[in-house]
């Protein structure tokens, strides 16, 4: 096999991006490809390979592969295994890369060089991108890059990925290295012995080599900012840090409720206006009903919550990028250990606040199999963004907007309470699992805390844009399909002339709902909720659209913006609370189950998730409804 | 074209889309195996090609 690549390109030059977690690989990937890969400031964000293309000025195509962060090719976690397999050419779906692009954090060079030296020993063409040079220079680091390059034996290019500095020089060097190629025989003879036989002596030798290189190449050491340590004295304090974390979470959820109100009203008004236009232009009949009661009611009721979803993601991205999330993970380690969880589980669980799917995938960073499985089993209990619309609807309809303390209102507090109850249930289930069929010793948390930095607003904006597009795409496909289907089931068959009662009760959906009603009556649910729950099992957000369609078909008084008012008149507070508890606990996402199947390589565990969560939801809703009725909320 | 026909067309399209997705996810694999056993290789390859390789989730950035 020859690593040299001719510029007469039939295939692109394959380049693998490697480095420690948090060194800016994905940020560099985005800068080079203009891609939209998510950028996060804690390990576990990139747990899959992300690929992008770069067309250089000389017309050469580079294929860039962003690999999960690794500390060593002696892999301990599934995501490090992916990196190792791709680099060594063992991955079944990928050929060995032509050039390795190692990325190192210039402010933490000593920590990064260990992995870089491992890559050097492979004998493949290698380029080092020394990222975050702006931060390093701010702190007074002065490196002689020529000496560093000479001692390492390959090119070193300083970069500032968010500002795209050094990218042009980097792509030029990558092309040069691809053309040069290296002697593969040397690489092949060194691969197996290097990773199997690392002992203490080898590691010590490696560190001595790093010290020697840095001593030669460093003219002035960086002065780490005192303010980072000062902030950490508060943020990592067991009491003040925990209080700060609670304050941050309460602020985030209150802001989601308050700041999103105006754009949500705009969307509601626009949908209402669209409904009026349809009423005027299309004569009364099945088509008008389909468009207003099916499409607008269903899709509109979900689209209305787009501002809240975007706000939630904006806050999560901001906290990730600033460096605070790793501190939060560290704080939570004590609590996690008490319930038998690894501290690293905090990051997948926190990701699950956005969506359980990347959260479950991020569990690959957990070495211990039992810890990983426990995390996967409880991730769906974390309140994901898909639950937010139904929470918002029910809280707005049933919880008064009373001031509690300063800017804190009852609605915001209830929202925090719902998120908190999801967390509490997750931790409780972790205790049960760890004490029963997943027993084993706890492993120690060892994690890097990145330095604080002002988040990159461009990356946050790109992340939000991507999220918004995905949300609208989902509304326009899955939810639209479900809304039309449910409209059909709720419209036909029609009653014969003269038959009593609302038309919907004669339809297929009505009959199905009546059939299911005895099963859900103890939970305080009526047949309309029962009908909406069925498609809601496929994806949570569908339930809201389905509920809107069913109520629109029943009343025929207007579009989705009346749903909150209608349920406020028809349901009791007990029913609303019961449905909220159902939503906290039930697994209503086939996609989550599919990813759990993929990550556990088994059908047993996703089936277990579905069964235990449905059982929890039924029992929880039942208790909530029965207690609420007895205290006078029924 | 009256409203009933338009609605019938739209709803039929939705049912067809759902049917195709169910076929791709759950039936195409079995069908292609059966076609292979029957010696209909070209049909088996065509059916196999209909199986979607996409991840089930479109609500997050994961590959």
Image (cartoon, rainbow, N blue to C red):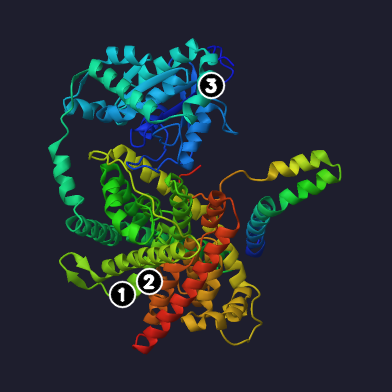
The image quadrant of residue A415 is bottom left
Please, which chain is the residue tagged with disc 1 on?
A
Label 3 vs 2, first from the N-terminus: 3
Q: Is residue A335 left or right of residue A236?
A: right
Look at mark 3 in the image and give the residue it sits on.
A12
Q: Secondary structure at mark 1?
A: loop
Residue at x 68% of width, y 50% of height: B24
Q: Which mark is residue A131?
A: none
Q: Pick the quarter of the image with the N terminus of chain A.
A: top right
Closer-to-camera residue (A24/B52): A24
Q: Is residue A440 left or right of residue B34?
A: left
- In this rendering, the answer to whether A159 lies above or below A578 is above
Residue A630: in sight, yes or no?
A: yes
Q: Pick the quarter of the image with the C terminus of chain A.
A: bottom left
Closer-to-camera residue (A289/A325): A325
Look at mark 1 in the image and give the residue it sits on.
A399
- In this rendering, the answer to whether A352 lies above or below A217 is below
Please, which chain is the residue tagged with disc 3 on?
A
Please, which chain is the residue tagged with disc 2 on?
A
Q: Secondary structure at mark 2?
A: helix
Q: Secondary structure at mark 3?
A: loop
Q: For the residues labelled 1 and 2, say whether their Cβ atoms are less than 8 Å apart.
A: yes
Do dots 1 and 2 share one subunit?
yes
Look at mark 2 in the image and give the residue it sits on.
A394
Do dots 3 and 1 share one subunit?
yes
């Amino acid at each position: 096999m020859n690593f040299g690549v001719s510029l007469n390109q039939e295939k692109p030059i394959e380049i693998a991006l490697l480095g420690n977690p948090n060194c800016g690989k994905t940020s560099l990937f985005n800068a080079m490809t203009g891609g939209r890969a998510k950028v996060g400031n804690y390990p576990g964000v990139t747990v899959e390979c992300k690929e992008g293309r770069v067309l250089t000025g000389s017309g050469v195509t580079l294929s860039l592969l962003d690999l999960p962060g690794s500390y060593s090719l002696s892999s301990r976690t599934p995501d490090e295994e992916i990196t190792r397999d791709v680099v060594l050419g063992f991955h079944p779906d990928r050929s060995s890369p032509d050039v390795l692009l190692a990325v190192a954090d210039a402010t933490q060079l000593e920590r990064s060089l260990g992995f870089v030296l491992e890559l050097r020993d492979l004998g493949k063409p290698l380029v080092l991108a020394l990222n975050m040079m702006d931060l390093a220079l701010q702190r007074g680091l002065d490196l002689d890059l020529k000496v560093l390059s000479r001692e390492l034996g390959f090119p070193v290019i300083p970069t500032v990925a968010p500002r795209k500095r050094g990218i042009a020089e980097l792509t030029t060097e990558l092309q040069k290295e691809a053309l040069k190629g290296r002697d593969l025989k040397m690489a092949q003879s060194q691969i197996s012995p290097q990773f199997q036989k690392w002992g203490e002596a080898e590691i010590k030798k490696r560190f001595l080599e790093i010290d020697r290189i840095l001593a030669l190449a460093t003219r002035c050491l960086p002065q780490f900012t005192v303010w980072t340590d000062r902030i950490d004295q508060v943020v990592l304090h067991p009491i003040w840090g925990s209080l700060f974390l609670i304050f941050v979470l309460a602020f985030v959820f209150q802001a989601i409720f308050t700041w999103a109100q105006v754009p949500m009203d705009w969307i509601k008004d626009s949908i209402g206006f669209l409904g009026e236009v349809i009423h005027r232009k299309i004569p009364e009949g099945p088509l008008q009903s389909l468009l207003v009661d099916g499409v607008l009611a269903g899709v509109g009721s979900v689209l209305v919550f787009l501002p809240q979803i975007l706000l939630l993601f904006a806050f999560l991205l901001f906290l990730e990028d600033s460096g605070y999330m790793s501190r939060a993970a560290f704080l939570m380690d004590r609590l996690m250990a008490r319930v038998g969880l690894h501290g690293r589980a905090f990051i997948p669980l926190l990701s699950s606040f956005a969506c359980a799917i990347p959260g479950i995938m991020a569990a690959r960073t957990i070495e211990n199999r039992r810890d990983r499985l426990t995390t996967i089993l409880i991730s769906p209990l974390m309140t994901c963004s898909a639950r937010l619309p139904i929470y918002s609807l029910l809280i707005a309809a049933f919880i008064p907007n009373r001031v509690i303390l300063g800017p804190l209102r009852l609605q915001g507090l209830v929202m925090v309470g719902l998120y908190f109850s999801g967390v509490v249930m997750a931790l409780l289930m972790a205790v049960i699992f760890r004490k029963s069929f997943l027993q084993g010793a706890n492993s120690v948390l060892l994690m890097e805390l990145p330095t604080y930095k002002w988040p990159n607003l461009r990356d946050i904006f790109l992340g939000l844009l991507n999220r918004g597009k995905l949300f609208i795409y989902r509304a326009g496909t899955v939810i639209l399909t479900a809304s039309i289907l449910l409209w059909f089931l709720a419209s036909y068959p029609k009653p014969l002339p003269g038959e009593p009662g609302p038309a919907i009760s004669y339809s297929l959906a009505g009959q199905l709902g009546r059939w299911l009603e005895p099963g859900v009556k103890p939970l305080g649910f009526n047949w309309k909720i029962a009908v909406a729950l069925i498609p809601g099992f496929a994806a949570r957000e569908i339930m809201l659209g389905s509920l809107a369609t069913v109520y629109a078909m029943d009343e025929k008084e207007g579009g989705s913006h009346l749903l909150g008012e209608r349920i406020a008149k028809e349901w009791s507070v007990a029913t609303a609370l019961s449905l909220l508890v159902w939503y906290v606990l039930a697994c209503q996402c086939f996609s989550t189950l599919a990813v759990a199947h993929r990550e556990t390589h088994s059908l047993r565990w996703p089936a277990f998730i579905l069964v235990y969560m449905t059982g929890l939801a039924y029992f929880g809703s039942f208790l909530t409804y029965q207690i609420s009725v007895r205290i006078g909320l029924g | 074209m009256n409203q009933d026909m338009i609605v019938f067309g739209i709803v039929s399209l939705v049912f067809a889309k759902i049917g195709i997705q169910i076929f791709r996810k759950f039936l195409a694999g079995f069908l292609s195996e059966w076609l292979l056993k029957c010696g209909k290789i070209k049909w088996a390859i065509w059916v196999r090609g209909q199986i979607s390789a996409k991840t089930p989730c479109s609500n997050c950035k994961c590959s």
